[in-house]
Image (cartoon, rainbow, N blue to C red):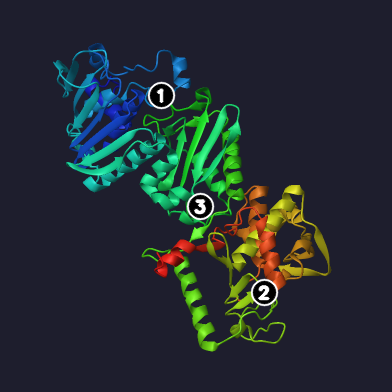
Amino acid sequence: MPRIEILPSEVAEKIAAGEVIERPVSLVKEFVENSIDAGARSITIDVEKGGKGLVRVADDGAGMSREDIELAFSRHATSKIRVIDDLFNVRTMGFRGEALASIAAVARVTAGTRSAQDQSGWEVSIEPPAAAEIRPVGRAPGTTIEARDLFFNIPARKKFLKRDQTELGHITRYLQAAALGFPGMSLSLSSNGRKVFSAPAVESLRRRAATFYGEDIAEDLVEAQGGREGLKVHALIAPPFYSRVNRYSQYIYVNNRYVRDRLLQAAVSQAFRGLIEPNRFPIIFLYVNISPAEVDVNVHPTKMEIRFRNANSVRGTVISVLSEALLSADFKSRITFEEGSTPRAQNIRRSIEDFYERRVAGGVEIGTPATHAGRSGGSGSLTRDGTDTEAAAAHVQTGPLMQVRGTYIVKESDDGIEIIDQHALHERVIYAEVRRRLEEGSLQGQRLLVPEVIEVTPAERTALEKARDAFGRLGIEAEAFGQDAFAFHSFPAVLGDMDRRSLLQALISDLSAGGHGRSMEEALDSLAELLACHAAVRAGDILGTEELQSLMEKARSAQGRFACPHGRPTKLVLTFDELERRFRRK
């Protein structure tokens, strides 16, 4: 075995630098955070070759004296930490005293600075392994720091950097996060002399969101606010139909520090459960303010990961604040006919056009009463007066409500023409009622005259035995019936008379597929979604006047009525402005 030896300082410094400096965006992050701590109101960033050739950051902050600039690039030099307890009460962006020294170990660094109290500034150049050179310089108050040729002295590390555009993308994403964390600060980025990013100072977070996501989303953002003593939560939430396929549009801040925290990401996902489609992620700007003593920001050298002292309490508070705002909101998905419209909006448009073509071509009367014709929804099902549903489903006028194709409900509102997916809305109404009753205790079960006996696999039998309490909460009484079957003696009364067997089979399948790691509440929530889906009216079901009115009345008080439990929107709005524009009235 080789003998143990002390590493040369040159090697040790490069190893330490590798922990802090991963890629060019690491330089940008450290420089910008130092500018924020210095009270800068305007920060300008210039990069070349995606930051691999140059990263320069200039600010109008407090600047440094000669004594400070001489020490700034020494290892463990910092103005923010004095004693060990300060590490657990961090109120600044930077604090470790490692970053500048690490950068100076792997790049050619020049920094110029001047404090407002000094008549002239100072400039320092550091190019390892040579000693730092300090000289006086004339300049405005503030600091400018640049790092050239990242990893010039570690060729093996340099090979792992990506293409210029990829590295520039990382920088742009970080700067967008920084801008959203500090709306009152101005940020700009130029790449190879061309401006690629600009975020002027604005008066509010909503205005900052408009800079990056447009006026429509900014206008639709819903505010969430709450918490408890020592923990305050503030968020702006975009309607779920603006969701994305990744988490890049989830901005999470703890004490104004942008972080990637799994606990808070999970809290956001839990708050949106049942309101957003699976594998989609909401646009959200989440700000958690907590006592610095309750959070450890010293988990990783990059300072992107944190740890809470009371993680469960933080998670629960965030979920509660977000859920309350989401469930009480009435998001409206607007229909537009420009390029890039959502497929769902385009499908609605075709349905409307098809409806008017049928009405004009066929001369069919509007206003024929109809009733819910069961669950078949296919060719040959009949309305109360015997009319074939395939013809009648195209349009049914019921006072202020109209049913289109036995699938959509159309009505006028203050905003425009609302187009409602009857299955999605009814599903949400049932789900909300089931969840309300579960929160009060359990659903009332209706005793079956003849038990429903269903054969099960060994895996399904095990899942059923473990979930017997959850089934009991839902009003479903089940017991083993031999080795290969279960007998069900009661059914939720709230669901009325429906195809119990297919629903029970779906519940059993969901339990088996869900695994054994789910909590009781997670299992109940999943089962409630299935109950609602199977009990709701289908596309193609003809609804009569009273049924349409009843559904709309119940929906008014249903929490989260803008989306079905699977996250699909329940309603789209064709605004009067859009109508007037399309008809060239304006």
Q: Amino acid at mark 3?
A: Pro
For image coordinates 60% across by 58% down, the residue present is 565
Mark 2 near mark 3, Cβ–Cβ under 8 Å?
no
Q: Which residue is mark 1?
A: 92
The answer to which of 286 and 208 lies nearer the viewer is 208
How crowded pointer 1 is (Cα within 10 Å; few <14, some 14-19, many 20+) is rated as: some
Callout 2: SS: loop
Q: CA distance from mark 2 to mark 1?
A: 61 Å
Q: CA distance from mark 1 to mark 3?
A: 33 Å
Residue 502 position, x and y percent, is: 68, 70
Of tags 1 and 3, which is closer to the observer?
3
Q: Is residue 455 above or below residue 172?
A: below
Q: Is residue 539 visible?
A: no
Q: Is residue 450 above or below residue 67?
A: below
Q: Is residue 418 above or below residue 216?
A: below
Of labels 1 and 3, earlier in sequence is 1
Give the numbered dot on residue 239: 3
Residue 159 sits in which quadrant?
A: top left
Q: Amino acid at mark 1?
A: Thr
